[in-house]
Image (tube, grey):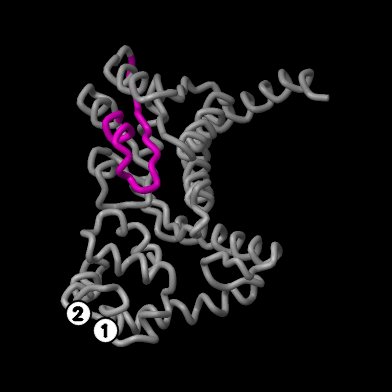
């Protein structure tokens, strides 16, 4: 897992003094290389002790190891992004449209690469087992995460699985209480702290469902109430209202889940996809 993705994932769980440091470093990672620990503390309006605590919160023993590791990471990425025609995570007012699009594409490619690289295949396999063994699949997310839930539900429905995207929090909790058949509940939340999604998985688990979380935050409420937690690695741009990069990473994980489920019954899946394609051909121009 990259240092920058680690900071992104941890930011929402940090106390205020450490969150200020995370925000500054996320916006300009090279500040850690350019400034001493005292200068960074002053820049973040906090203390040197808080900077040390921040380092430990993201897995480093102190500031010097963080500087060395981040310098190595940024150096590798400079070459990688340069080859793709863009470098740097933030879209600025001075960027041309072509430069802004190149930066966004580079971030999205990086999110997919890092998400797949750190994927725990044992957990993925267990989540696929839960989905494949369920007679009823409940999916829930809010905002951009709902679009991801809908994407997985659409794929599963196309191969004959009983998948339902729940439209609001009351419906989600009500559906998760009623266990008329073996059920798996899947919750989507980038930060892993969306109250409604956490409550949905909590209720589902308490009532006997298998639970799966798709999130970027390992130490999050959503991950803690999931039997199987799958994590994205994401660095969002400041233009995050549409949850662009996080959505792409979640969709990559959704495709991994679907491929795993589809392979369990390969011949049936191929047949179902062909039949549903033929059935909808008449509806196309």
Q: Position of residue 31 (x, y in %)?
A: 39, 80
Query: In the picture shown, does residue 271 fall above or below 13?
Result: above
Relative side of 276 to 111, left or right: right
Residue 4 is marked as: none
Relative side of 256 to 231, left or right: right
Query: In the picture shown, does residue 41 fall above or below 171?
Result: below
| In the image, residue 196 lies in the stretch drawn in magenta | yes
Q: Are marks 1 and 2 in contact (CB under 8 Å)?
A: yes
Q: Residue at x 46, y 23 (%)?
A: 163
Q: Quadrant of residue 268?
A: top right
Say which of 253 and 276 sits in front. Answer: 253
Q: Position of residue 171 (x, y in %)?
A: 36, 19
Q: Residue at x 24, y 43 (%)?
A: 221
**Crowdedness of circle 1 by 10 Å Cα count: few (<14), some, many (20+)?**
many
Q: Residue at x 52, y 67 (%)?
A: 89
**Mark 1 → mark 2, Cα distance in angstroms:** 6 Å
| Mark 2 secondary-structure assignment | helix
Residue stretch in magenta:
181-200
The residue singled out by tag 2 in the image is 48
Q: Earlier in the sequence, mark 1 or mark 2?
A: 1
Q: Position of residue 123 (x, y in %)?
A: 34, 46
Quarter of the picture containing the C terminus is: top right
The residue singled out by tag 1 in the image is 37
Say which of 218 and 8 sits in front. Answer: 8
| In the image, residue 87 lies in the stretch drawn in magenta | no
Q: Residue at x 27, y 38 (%)?
A: 226
Q: Quadrant of residue 177?
A: top left
**Crowdedness of circle 2 by 10 Å Cα count: few (<14), some, many (20+)?**
some
| Mark 1 secondary-structure assignment | helix
């Amino acid at each position: 897992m990259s240092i920058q993705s680690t900071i992104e994932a941890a930011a929402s769980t940090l106390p205020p003094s450490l969150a200020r440091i995370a925000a500054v470093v996320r916006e300009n990672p090279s500040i850690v290389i350019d400034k001493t620990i005292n200068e960074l503390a002053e820049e973040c309006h906090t203390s040197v002790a808080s900077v040390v605590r921040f380092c430990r919160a993201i897995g480093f023993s102190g500031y010097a190891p963080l500087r060395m590791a981040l310098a190595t990471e940024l150096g590798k990425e400079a070459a990688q992004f340069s080859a793709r025609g863009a470098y740097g995570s933030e879209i600025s007012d001075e960027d041309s449209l072509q430069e802004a699009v190149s930066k966004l594409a580079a971030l999205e490619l990086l999110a997919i690469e890092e998400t797949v690289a750190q994927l725990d295949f044992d957990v993925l396999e267990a989540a696929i087992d839960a989905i494949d063994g369920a007679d009823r699949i409940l999916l829930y997310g809010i905002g951009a995460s709902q679009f991801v839930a809908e994407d997985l539900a659409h794929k599963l429905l196309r191969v004959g699985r009983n998948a339902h995207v729940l439209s609001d929090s009351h419906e989600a909790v009500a559906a998760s209480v009623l266990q008329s058949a073996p059920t798996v509940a899947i919750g989507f939340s980038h930060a892993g702290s969306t109250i409604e999604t956490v409550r949905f998985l909590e209720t589902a688990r308490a009532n006997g469902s298998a639970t799966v979380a798709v999130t970027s935050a390992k130490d999050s409420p959503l991950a803690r109430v999931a039997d199987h937690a799958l994590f994205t690695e994401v660095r969002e741009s400041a233009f995050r209202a549409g949850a662009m990069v996080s959505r792409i990473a979640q969709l990559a994980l959704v495709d991994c889940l679907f491929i795993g489920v589809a392979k369990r019954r390969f011949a049936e899946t191929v047949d179902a996809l062909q039949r549903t394609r033929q059935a909808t051909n008449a509806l196309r121009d």
